Amino acid sequence: MIEKLNVIQTMMALLGASAVAVTALEGVLIGRLANRQKAGQPGRQPYDWSAFWVTVRINLWRVLVEAIPMGVVLGASLPFGQWMYEQRLWTVPMDTWWGWVAMFFCTEFFYYWMHRAGHRIRWYWASHQVHHSGNQYNLAAAFRQSITGKVTGGFVFFAPQCLFGFSPDAVLISYGLNLVYQFWIHTDLVPKLGWMEGVFNTPSAHRVHHAANVEYLDCNYGGTIMLFDRLFGTYVGEKDGVPIRYGLVKAQTSRNALWVCLAEWAAIGRDLLKVRNPLHAVGYLFGPPGWAPHGRGLTTEGLRQAMTSLTGQPAGVPPEWLLEGQPVPVGEVPAATGAPDAMAFTPVGQARRV
């Protein structure tokens, strides 16, 4: 198992190096398109190379973390998966075509729930928020991955696959291929793809997933297909004519790579220090991001309610004063009656996005 893991890690490293080169080329292309805009031709925002280098530094931190021998959690996850396989209900033959088809859908199912938990449970969001911290949507976003993912124990979502008869090696390979597919969808250079929308995870579908617009929060969790988003009501298509603001609801502007990785953990720590009720501690750790006691938090539902009061519909990007828990600015008249009392909400953390 360990030998095979090393082979997979080598393969992923080679693929990663190739992907970084493609990512840099995308940055050059976006830069040229931005230059055309300066010349009076249609274009886009300049490529944020400083954010690109933040992503590079995040991955250097990941290399350091991965250098810790197997890591505490990974060292437990591999034997756990093997133990689950030894208790398997049946054996799925991986030398058959249908075995790999079954593996594909099984991996997609558990990936969906792992990804959904990463947005709806703050313990997992503390790691996953790193992936959403970029304020532009490009291939570099695919490489923004947490250094604390093993600490949160996301592997538990895939261990049941071993119980269902898939070997740990097959699970590892299938999950890796799922992630490799997702590299190309992190771009806004590719338009909608016709009949593929709503069937596969496309750049358009994933743009929605990375949006800070409240109508787009908590949707499109699938890795390669939208099947389970369709089944569980979390699929949202990209709306024409609606500008997307990417990143966290409260934008992450730090260029400190380590802080980008740990900002939400620090916010959790601050919340726990003020806890007097043990149930509140559970809420801060395992409730949805933005949760606060007595309904004072700006969760996805709270943000949509607030935006409905302000604009008449649960849509748009929340204003900064709302995120900071400040009063409605003088002269800003809500579109709907019953404007939210911003002071009734707890200000969101620096890495807040639900």
Image: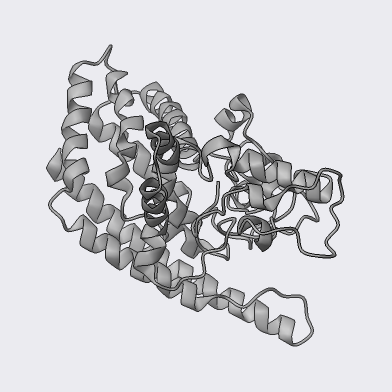
| Closest to the observer, 276 or 86 | 276
Say which residue appears at 72% left-offset and 86% top-offset: 38
In the picture shown, does residue 99 fall above or below 63? above
Residue 154 appears anywhere in the view: yes
**Toward which corner of the image does residue 266 lie, by quadrant?**
bottom left
Image side of residue 200 versus residue 167, left or right: right
Q: Residue at x 22, y 63 (%)?
A: 64
Measured from the top left, where is residue 245 in percent x and y?
A: 66, 60
In the rendering, at what x and y percent does residue 227 appear?
58, 30
Report if residue 194 is visible in the image.
no
Residue sticking out furthest to the bottom: 39
Q: Residue 253 or 284: which is nearer the viewer?
A: 284
Q: How is the image coloured?
A: one colour
The residue at the far front in this view is 276
**Depth order, front residue of 352/155:** 352
At 36% across and 37% down in the image, what residue appears? Answer: 174
* Residue 29 relative to residue 111: left or right: right
Number of numbered discs visible in the structure rendering = 0
The image quarter in which residue 19 lies: bottom left
Q: Where in the figure is residue 11, as x and y percent of width and height?
A: 27, 53
State the residue in front, 175 or 72.
Answer: 72
Image-based side of 110 in relation to 317, left or right? left
- Residue 215 drawn above or below residue 14: above
Q: Residue at x 73, y 81 (%)?
A: 37
Q: Quadrant of the N terminus?
A: top left
